Image: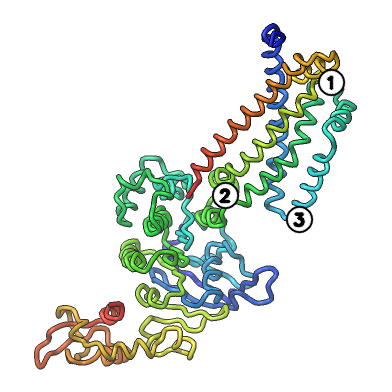
Amino acid sequence: MSYFSAHLPLIVQLTGEHVRLVLCGLSIALLAAIPLGIAAARKPALETPVLALAGAIYTIPSLALLALAVQYAGLGFWSVVAVLAAYAQFVLVRAAAIALRSVPQRHAEAAAGLGMTALQRFLRVEAPLAMPVFLGGVRVATVASIAIATLGGYVGAGGLGSEIFYGLSRQYPEQTLAGSIPAALLAIAADAFFRLWERAARARVSE
Amino acid sequence: MQQPNSSVRFDAVTVRYAGTDRNAVDGVTLEIPHGSFTVLLGPSGCGKSTLLRTVNRLVIPISGRVYVGGADVSSLDPVALRRGIGYVIQAVGLFPHFTVAQNVGVVPSLLRWDAARIAARVDELLALVNLDPDRYRARYPRELSGGEAQRVGVARAIAAEPELLLMDEPFGAVDALVRASLQDEIAAIARRVRATILFVTHDVDEALRLADRIVVMRAGKVEQHGTPLELLARPASGYVADLLQTRDVVRRLGLLRVRDAMRPAQGTSDAYIAADASLRDALNDFLNGAQRLGVRDGEVQTGTLEFDDVRRALRA
């Protein structure tokens, strides 16, 4: 505890970096995964190859993926962001596809029959109705990203991982805990946040 | 729609769904007059819903053409076409995340009416379908009963004053009591909005109750098309006779007296019938071309009988 209280400003700063890594990785992940998920939901022929590719990435150990990313993006922030974005694809693409397919046929048909354009159908009806299921996927991806982002400590990207790795290399458990406990709390908080959001979204679309 | 006329014409329309080896709709040629209440009647799988859905292009025929108000629908923009056509489906399909007011106002808002005009129209429509606007406008669909939800579905379909209304088994999911009151309401609404209505059902009583014209379908084809009177009196095939249970209906009419079905004497009559005669006799006179029968009890005219009165007697 003495280490923790003595280094509180540092822990706060590293937590901030950690959050930044995760937010950046997830934002990029969502930008790619949402269109891919929509495509997979609309065109069954696309679903298998898209999910197979995302699944293949998912099976690569995250550390190996990071080593690969460093080859291209160098040490630091962007390598970790790239790993987070790539790693989240499997969960997010599948969640987006399943979420869209969970929208009851009658709502999609009513929307079309009333004369909504494809974009209006998506934005006004399908996306809000798909939201609860999709948020479940975002929650899982976020929690996983918070864990994986600790690898940032390994490649000089900052975040709570740096405390963990320094602590490990110096055999200084208190320092390791000063990184891993806030990371775990962050994951728990993110999980709770998305569960609440999911519940609110579900209540909104319940029939 | 620009056309003042919203007749519907099917010209050799054939639909086959991908992956099936049978035509869901098989060469249907049919004319639905402007302003009529036409019911497509038949068992499930006979192609009636599919035929209906070719009108707003939710289903594309593999051959043949569909005309609305004289315009070939395949030449029209589907979004604009659908905004001009009211559409009610059995599953209702109210959007659960929209309030009642937002659901009813969805087509006007797509047409970019201003907010005040939409709000006024929503209140007017809720009143029309017998829902108190102050109580219902802010509710969500989950707070409605099945019958209330279907009323909102009807209000949504007619919000932008369509001249053509497509109704696909709209009352199939509500219980019999609610269904009867919804049928009365839709009949009243149909008279008020003066739209052409195409109504799909497998319920013979519903068809007889609502239709000016009935199209009986079987295996993707039109089996018979005519007024309820023509179908009851002269079924074109055993299939139509069985479906409408015409023998049953005629027998029931034989048991009912003219005096119990007539209305107070009014207007001129083109033939006369005794008050003690059966409605079956009256049906015969209507078949022979009578529009309105004077009802005589001895030498005195005590009432008037029209085909609608016979129809009403059948319901009771």
User: Disc 3 marks which residue?
Assistant: A45
Amino acid type assigned to the residue bearing label 1 in the image:
Val
Q: CA distance from mark 2 to mark 1?
A: 47 Å
User: Disc 1 marks which residue?
Assistant: A155
User: Disc 2 marks which residue?
Assistant: A117
Counting from the top left corner in percent of width and height, residue B218 is at 54, 81
Residue at 44 percent of width and 63 percent of height: B164
Q: Nearer the viewer, mark 2 or mark 1?
A: 1
Chain bearing mark 3 = A
**Which picture quadrant has residue A69?**
top right
Of helix, strand and loop, which one carries label 3? helix
Question: On screen, A44 above or below B72?
Answer: above
Q: Nearer the viewer, mark 1 or mark 3?
A: 1
Could you tell me if residue B78 is visible in this image? no
Identify which residue, A206 or B39, lies in the foreground: A206
First along the sequence among labels 2 and 1:
2
Of helix, strand and loop, which one carries label 1? loop
Q: Going by the picture, which residue comes out furthest to the top? A: A6
**Which picture quadrant has residue A154?**
top right
Amino acid type assigned to the residue bearing label 3 in the image:
Ala
Q: Going by the picture, which residue comes out furthest to the right? A: A71
